[in-house]
Image: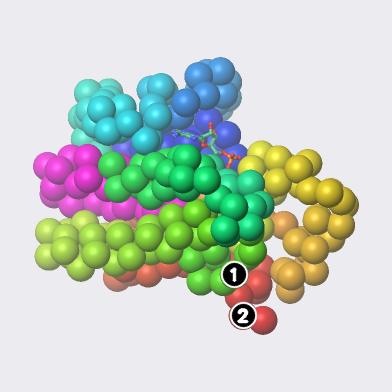
Amino acid sequence: MVAIVTGGAGGMGRDTALLFAREGASVVVGDVDIDGGASLLAEIAAAGGKAVFQRTDVAVEADVAALVAKAEQSYGKLDTIFNNAGIEQPVTASDEISEELFERVIDINLKGTFFGCKHAIPALLRNGGGTIVNNSSVSAFANVGGNLSYAASKGGIMSMTRVIAIEYAARNIRCNAINPGVIDTGMNQRNKAKAADPDAMEQKWRSITPLGRMGTGTEIGEAVLFLASAQSSFVTGIGLVIDGGRIAT
Ligand SMILES: NC(=O)c1ccc[n+]([C@@H]2O[C@H](COP(=O)([O-])OP(=O)(O)OC[C@H]3O[C@@H](n4cnc5c(N)ncnc54)[C@H](O)[C@@H]3O)[C@@H](O)[C@H]2O)c1
């Protein structure tokens, strides 16, 4: 399997890239973090896996087109793309969000996912089909508070996922999303550090999660692997909630 992971140099993207490589996939990592990409490649190579890195800002269409081209040039085809790159919105009252902040979050999270889908689809069609996994969030379904642009971007990703799933179903492309709850990554380390009371913030995350803890990037990677592979061959157009029970409450 040839797999693109955007935002693969850190957080759950990194854990997913490691898992894909461990399972024998050839991984194409796109990220703005060049140092993180280099250290990931070293770790994958040391474990006997295959990966290449391409500096990619998912908000820049030419970068995303080049990332897809890199996959086909390096490994001859594309089987799957995990559109994972995303940023948080600092907690802000909705009537105080600047246009600049709103546009930045939408550009990376929503437009970046659109570019990933748009440019992967022709490569997947050349391959006779394949899979797309988009990283949405429980924020698409449940109010988190203080993150309007983030929630809007993640809701948009869910809608886009369904559109693509239906439009390309007959051409053997499946498109699904994941909806993580609170996962222990750099993003949430930053969210915690910015909170007035960081310990209270972590305690809140645990208390809203019936399983009583934050999820791990590897737990997300396992779900992405399922949706990317033939094990999920009859699954398309869904959002797979991976949240320790949070939105069931
Ligand atoms: N952490 C959570 O609790 C959580 C929950 C739900 C959804 N998500 C989503 O999961 C995805 C990954 O989040 P994470 O928690 O691993 O974050 P993270 O900040 O730990 O890692 C994100 C990675 O994306 C990269 N990135 C950022 N902007 C980029 C850009 N413009 N182009 C390319 N790469 C870029 C970063 O360099 C980093 O390597 C995001 O889409 C996020 O919204 C996270």
Q: Residue at x 50, y 54 (%)?
A: 149
Front-lying residue, 82 or 152: 152
Q: Amino acid at mark 2?
A: Ala
Residue 221's spot in the image, x, y percent?
52, 50
Q: Quadrant of residue 70?
A: top left
Q: Residue furthest front?
A: 95
Residue 83's spot in the image, x, y percent?
39, 46
Residue 36's spot in the image, x, y percent?
57, 24
| Boundaries of the magenta span | 116-137
Front-lying residue, 193 or 229: 193
Mark 1 or 2, which is nearer the eye? Answer: 1
Residue 225's spot in the image, x, y percent?
44, 52
Per the image, the residue denoted by label 2 is 248
Is 76 included in the stretch rendered in magenta?
no
Name above or below for residue 158 compared with residue 120: below
Number of residues whose C-alpha sits closer than 10 Å to that of mark 2, classed few (under 14), some (14–19) or many (20 or more): few
Which quarter of the figure is the C terminus placed in? bottom right
Q: Secondary structure at mark 2?
A: helix
Front-lying residue, 49 or 184: 184
Which quarter of the figure is the N terminus placed in? top left
Q: Is residue 16 visible?
A: no
Task: Using the numbered discs, state the Cα–Cα distance from disc 1 to disc 2 in whole angstroms.
Answer: 13 Å
Q: Is residue 106 toward the left or the right of residue 172 in the image? A: right
